[in-house]
Amino acid sequence: MQRSVVLVKPDGLQRGLIGEIVTRFERKGLKLVALKMTKLSHEVLDEWYAHHKEKPFFTGLKAFMMQTPIVAMVWEGLDAADTIRKLVGVTKGRAAEAGSIRGDFAMSQSNNLIHASDSVENAEKELKLLFGKDEIFSYESGVDCLVYSNEERGQK
Ligand code: CMP
């Protein structure tokens, strides 16, 4: 199974959307394997957004991400990274498809509520930046046999 990192950004926290966001992933059949509230440091954000370092919005983005604590989660499932990106919607909230999280709750390109890993490689990098090994759990879920076929569950 793949793992993917999701952050509820400061605007999502302040707008009271944590429960809504968690519910959407739960209902989809993804498995929550880590969850915590934390404050992001300059050092972590420099690594996290290293690919945006030269962009004009980099400084503002960092300031935004440090406004309040964020809620960080790790979700597990088959093709979790792609599946979560679809549930989240495209970067610009007002262009995101209705039914996606950004499509339903966001207007902005910067204040877009939520971060989701864009690849399996980045998910593993992000996971190491925010979580210790003892903060990520592995457990049998009673509904795995309903969410996936036997063949799919064999693809672990
Ligand atoms: P995300 O896709 O999670 O990761 C990069 C973030 O940079 C993005 O969400 C937005 O929050 C922010 N971002 C992307 N493009 C812009 C932009 N043009 N102006 C301001 N912020 C942006």
Image: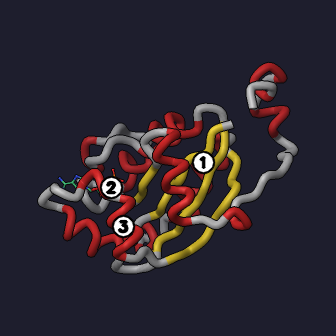
Give the residue type at disc 2: Ala
Q: Disc 2 or 1, which lies upstream in sequence?
A: 1
Q: CA distance from mark 2 to mark 1?
A: 17 Å
Residue 142 vertical position relative to residue 59 in the rendered view, above or below: above
Q: Residue furthest top?
A: 151
Q: Quadrant of residue 54?
A: bottom left
Q: Which element carries disc 1, helix, strand or loop?
A: helix
**Which image quarter holds the C terminus?**
top right
**Residues marked 2 and 1 touching at CB (< 8 Å):** no
**Which image quarter holds the N terminus?**
top right
Q: Residue at x 40, y 77 (%)?
A: 41
Q: Residues within 10 Å of mark 1 (few under 14, many from 20)?
A: some
Could you tell me residue 78's position as x and y percent? Answer: 65, 33
Q: Quadrant of residue 53?
A: bottom left
Disc marking residue 45: 3
Q: Which element carries disc 3, helix, strand or loop?
A: helix
Q: Residue furthest left?
A: 56
Q: CA distance from mark 2 to mark 3?
A: 22 Å
Q: Nearer the viewer, mark 3 or mark 1?
A: 3
Quadrant assignment for ligand 1: bottom left
Could you tell me residue 32's position as x and y percent? Answer: 68, 54
Q: Which residue is mark 2?
A: 106
Q: Which element carries disc 2, helix, strand or loop?
A: loop
Q: Residue at x 56, y 47 (%)?
A: 4
Q: CA distance from mark 3 to mark 1?
A: 25 Å
Q: Residue at x 46, y 37 (%)?
A: 86
Q: Residue at x 26, y 48 (%)?
A: 92
The scheme the figure's colours follow is: secondary structure
Q: Which residue is mark 1?
A: 25
Give the residue type at disc 1: Phe
Q: Disc 2 or 3, which lies upstream in sequence?
A: 3
Give the residue type at disc 3: Leu
